[in-house]
Image: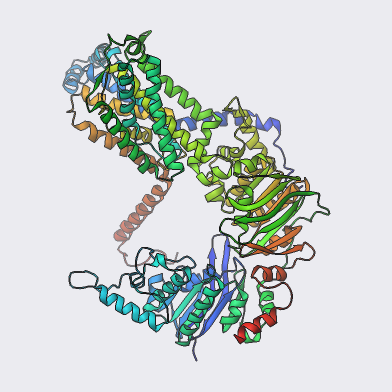
Amino acid sequence: MTALLEAVNITKQFPGTLALDHVNVELKAGEIHAIMGENGAGKSTLMKILAGVHSPDAGEIRFEGRPITIANPHEALQYGINIVYQELSLVPALTVAENIYPGRLPTNIFGMVRYPTLFRNTTQMLSQLNVAVEARTRVEALSIANQQLVEITKAISSNCKVLILDEPTSALTDYEADILLAFLRRLADNGVGILYISHKLNEIFALADRITVLRDGKYVGTKNTSDVTPDEIVRMMVGRDLGHMYPPKSQQVGDVLLEVQNFRLHGASQCNSFKLHKGEILGFAGLIGSGRTELARAVFGAEPHAEGRVILNGSPVHIQSPKKAIKLGIGYLPEDRKAAGLFLEMSLKWNVEATVIQDVSAIGFVSAPKERELAEQYIRTLNISTPSIEQEVQRLSGGNQQKALVAKWLSIQPKILIVDEPTRGIDVGAKREIHFLLRSLAESGVGVIMISSELPEILGMSDHVLVMHEGSIVAEYSAAEATEEKIVRSASGQPAKIEVDTEISKIEVN
Amino acid sequence: METTTLMRKPLMERFSLKNITGSLLQLLLQIARAREFSLVIMLILIGCGLHLYTGEFFHSFGKEMERAAKNGRLISELDSRLSYAIDEGRFFTEANLRAVGLGFAASAIMVFGMTAALVSGGFDLSVGSVYALGGVVVAMALRDGHSVGTAIIYGVGVGVLAGAVNGLLITWAKINPFIATLGMLGIARGLGLVLTKGTPVTVAFEDFPSFVDPLGQGVTKGFPNLIIIGIGTIIIGDILMRHSARFRQIYYVGGNEEAARLSGINVRRVKIGVYVLSGMLAALAGVLSVSRFTVADPGAATGEELRVIAACIIGGCSLRGGKGTVLGGLLGLIFVALINNAMILTKVPVYYQQLTMGVVLLLAVGLDTLGQHWAEIKTTVRHWWFRSKNLVNHLASGDLFTDSKSKPS
């Protein structure tokens, strides 16, 4: 039987990175095919190529055996290839029916919508698919899970042969996810081919027929779900040498510097506690959206927290704003340097002194020699390549922008530095420099909390690793204990022991 | 650590002649690139042009010059005309400059507050109304027998209050600055009308000499006090915005609000402060205008907010925030005032004033954007230039249908 949709040797180059390197995927009709890989493995890029958002640099896409080119999302739709993104694209104020049929609303001769027909058609379609949603309800009144179902119904309401789903259950509770998964199973039984991206191992083992694993943009392999164990998949997803990207770790850590006790965020049910020692790099691992950033921002005072205590150097402190945190010597390097870190249209000088503007001033006025001295000091120590301190930071390279951001936080002489994805989107050289810089900071007695979605970085840098999953810290490893497999397993919500097999078989029996 | 030990440039190299001339050149370039510089140049040009025009320099210029050239007296004719024009020109005269200066002195005070609001990423639409309300309040307080000092405090205080409400609405109720200050525009204007029942309140000179004389109509060493106060506010404002650590926070907030917050800046306090400043200065301008005209009109300065915003934008402010200077705003204001003055002097019908102002605003902003995208435009133009040249070559050589790339070289 020929495959419904085939991607052969797909290669895609983005400026600076090879996102996909000769990747192969084959999807049969009626099959649920999971695509797995770490963050940045190229899953999303592959999906976007199949949906016509990007076009591949090399390789071939075959549809029902014929080679095709998909120039844009519209063409993909004409082949019956539909994609549902993680972010929903429904209009909340309109009814379910209007959301399912945008642009194809039945109209009378005056161009007015024939609502009775619309609602009748929609109700019929929803009942065929066993979706328990009223056609006349406004979308904003639905639960996220039902919105997800409406979104999928919308995708398959026209000619749909291939359905691509990007982490559809990331916002759902277990119960809601079960409804969605059952729905997908029924769709597949009707002959639709489903490509399914998810990080959740147990979900995939319960649902998918086959699994394709990508790593660093490369094709690793495709397995029948019945032939493999979660362990084997995890092993396929990780495993590469760390090289000399990382400085040697420190031999001993000092006293407890920061202690966070029973810390609970607004709207969360879990409490988290952790300790940070002097001279230690504490790595926070986990999937994107696992709550690491939220926890860090709350500790820094950028978000309010519901309850919990923060103890700094043995005395409890109440950090209600970033201003207070900075006063206490805590710095926070946000993950999105352009949106939350830098003043892009301002000079390097202004960016570096933003946190210490009072310190470079005398009697309330900014002192030009002091600010020049400060900026030049960090250009030297961080090796920022810039024509002058007056250069707008948006004209610097990504690595130098990141260094400017680091400089802004070093200028407060931090005792604790929280760095969130410190090396995202920068070149290898700058990455290495930032790694060595963080280590030298730690050696000078600073406590560093490093959030990173790159496992090698977590393993290469951390003296201690905490793993978060769905808002809570689920595992803790010392540098010696931590392995990629253990972290991946904890991050995707698997128990740390080898009870995995029995867990899976239970789900399959259900 | 290897990353932190970096070679320091030798001292000699850092202070070499080349470096010093280089940084001097850079400084000059920076000045030349600033919006203020081009505005000053344009102001001087317009001023000189107007002076010569009103000195009848251009009066039947071509005919006279032709005759002079025939007689071989071109230079001396030009010279006598020029000296006559310089003597007789009506632009650089005390009376005209004073009229222009008094015309924009009140607006200049508001420019400081508006620049701060624009730099913080918002704007204040209520300044015109608060100006009128401040005037009405001070006039009524004086009429009710309060001392001059108390009356002024009431007048300015009303502006502070309006600004504080604006700031609270924007920061705590999270209402968009456009809507919040538009609401205040209506409320302040309406309050003025309610208080006066629509009739102007007079503050006659003979009744309140201690209010009118030192402020609105007083003259110190030949300069009207109003102009001194306006220029003084601008200078103080410009220095504060450029050099004060507190006011620098406004730029950070406007440049990237989230980054500013994470850098330990109290964004709410900065924003409230900005609107308080703007309201206070608007009311102060209103108080001063009452002391100049000796009458508080609740309908005064309608539409002034847009003129002030336009002046600030011409002077280099950006609606996206993070950018702009007080001096630039003042120059923008003078620019618009001069163009209006020019139209009066050249007897262009008054109906053209608004139209011209609109054109000037679009030109100033348009040219600036054009400059920013200049490289892009250049490549596009070059691209099409080469394409058309290629096409012409092809047509000339007759091989239009062969691709030049596929030809063997």
Q: Outermost residue, front direction?
A: B144
* Viewer-closest of B289 and A2: B289
Whether residue A72 can be seen here? no
Does A61 appear above or below B159? below
Q: Quadrant of residue B206?
A: top left
**Can residue B357 be seen from the camera position used here?**
yes
User: Residue at (47%, 23%) from the top-left corner?
Assistant: B236
Residue at the image point whose x is 59% and y is 85% from the top: A510
Instruction: Give whichever of A439, A187 is nearer the camera.
Output: A187
Q: Position of residue A204 (x, y in %)?
A: 59, 78
Q: Is residue B41 above or below residue A37?
A: above
In percent of width and height, residue A177 lies at: 53, 74
Q: Is residue A214 left or right of residue A133?
A: right
Classify B389 as above or below B208.
below
Q: Is residue B192 left or right of residue B39?
A: left
Label total for image: 0
Instruction: Decide which of B65, B278 is in the foreground and name it.
Output: B278
Colour scheme of this structure image?
Answer: rainbow
Camera-side residue: B92 or B145?
B145
A10 with respect to A234 (left or right): left
> Residue at horizontal 37%, vertical 67%?
A138
